[in-house]
Image (cartoon, rainbow, N blue to C red):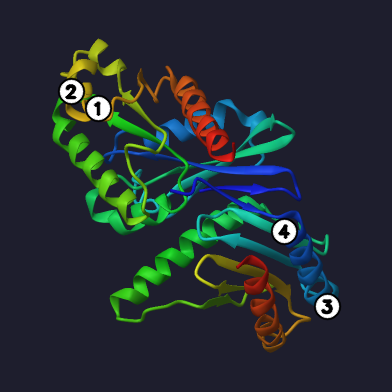
Amino acid sequence: MAFINIRNKEIQLKIVYYGPGQGGKTTNLLYINKNFSEKIKSQMVTIDTYGDRTIFFDFFPLDLGQINGFDVKIQLYTVPGQSRYDTTRKLVLNGVDGIVFVADMLASMRRKNILSLKNLHENLIKYHKNIFNIPLLFQFNKVDLSQKGYPVLTPERLTDDLNRQLKRPWITASALTGENVALTLKKIISMTTANIKISLN
Amino acid sequence: MRLAKLIKKRQLDFLYETLDCELIQNGITSVVLIDLAGNVLTNLSNGEHDFDTYSLASLTAGNFGAVTALLDQIGEPELTLLFNQGQMLNIYFRKISADYILIVVFDKSISLGYVRLKMDTIENLVKETLT
């Protein structure tokens, strides 16, 4: 949950990029880290990767500026996507305020997207959070692959698979080229801060 | 579902005063109080080092969670402290109640025994303040 430090006039929010393995969660953070360096005072922390796979989490804090006189610090995390790392995935979700679900548009990833969302739902329950209440944004990633001739899932198919009941906003993106990566971040920050404002009022 | 944790200014003032008086003024390099989500509650330093507090907090929360899960595998229910003796600086982590971790960084001029002794007093004070 968000931490509001009255003494230092600071709000800390935790946003987690969730989704199936090799879906582009780390690539999202790498793009943000590279392209918004003026807002980021820290190096991106990447723990224990085996090859290019995240096995614990990636992290960096992002300074958002001020809202109502409070400095807002967004803590961005990714989780390991592979099913075997569920324990660490659960740990990263502790205290989460907003989630970007990075779904992989590759047609062959359809089942893994669905399983990962189910896993998110189950892991949130363990922290007494409800997937229907938490700020959640879908990013349908790897939109560039269709232009390269790869079989991809359409946004309609992905919406039907993942978002039929949740009815959350979604964005198509390419973390690799940066297309809509910033928009995704902007949108989830806006959703998360709005939710915290509601809770404070 | 609680969405935000808000700690009163007087509680934080008391924590800052206590940690400064008990630890920083007695030679400790840096003291950071965090919650298990990796949020920073207090951050004090003697000014000799400039650590990236937020990375320190996220890594500590992750590390504590990972070791707790590890202990669970061998049937140990709880992790209360971690310690690493470094070449220049040592780092001591102490879990305080179910939700918080105190990170204490100190150099060779301070003994681990002294830090552990101080922790018993501080743990109670922090618990009383935050509950």
The residue labelled by disc 3 is B26
Please name the amino acid that badge 1 sits on. Answer: Asn
Q: Nearer the viewer, mark 1 or mark 3?
A: 1
Q: Earlier in the sequence, mark 4 or mark 3?
A: 3
Give the residue pinned by disc 4.
Answer: B43
Residue B97, position in %: x, y?
A: 54, 73
Q: CA distance from mark 1 to mark 2?
A: 6 Å
Q: Residues within 10 Å of mark 2 (few under 14, many from 20)?
A: few
| Category of crowding for the residue at label 4, using alpha-carbon neighbours closer than 10 angstroms: few (below 14), some (14–19), many (at least 20) | some
Q: Give how far across and how far down residue A103 sits, in percent.
A: 28, 30
The chain under label 1 reads A
Can you give x and y, in whole percent of width and height, for residue A64 in the image? 64, 31
2 vs 3, front mark = 2
* Label 4 and label 1 in one chain: no
Tag 1 and tag 3 share a subunit: no
Q: Amino acid at mark 3?
A: Asn
Residue A27 appears left or right of A12: left
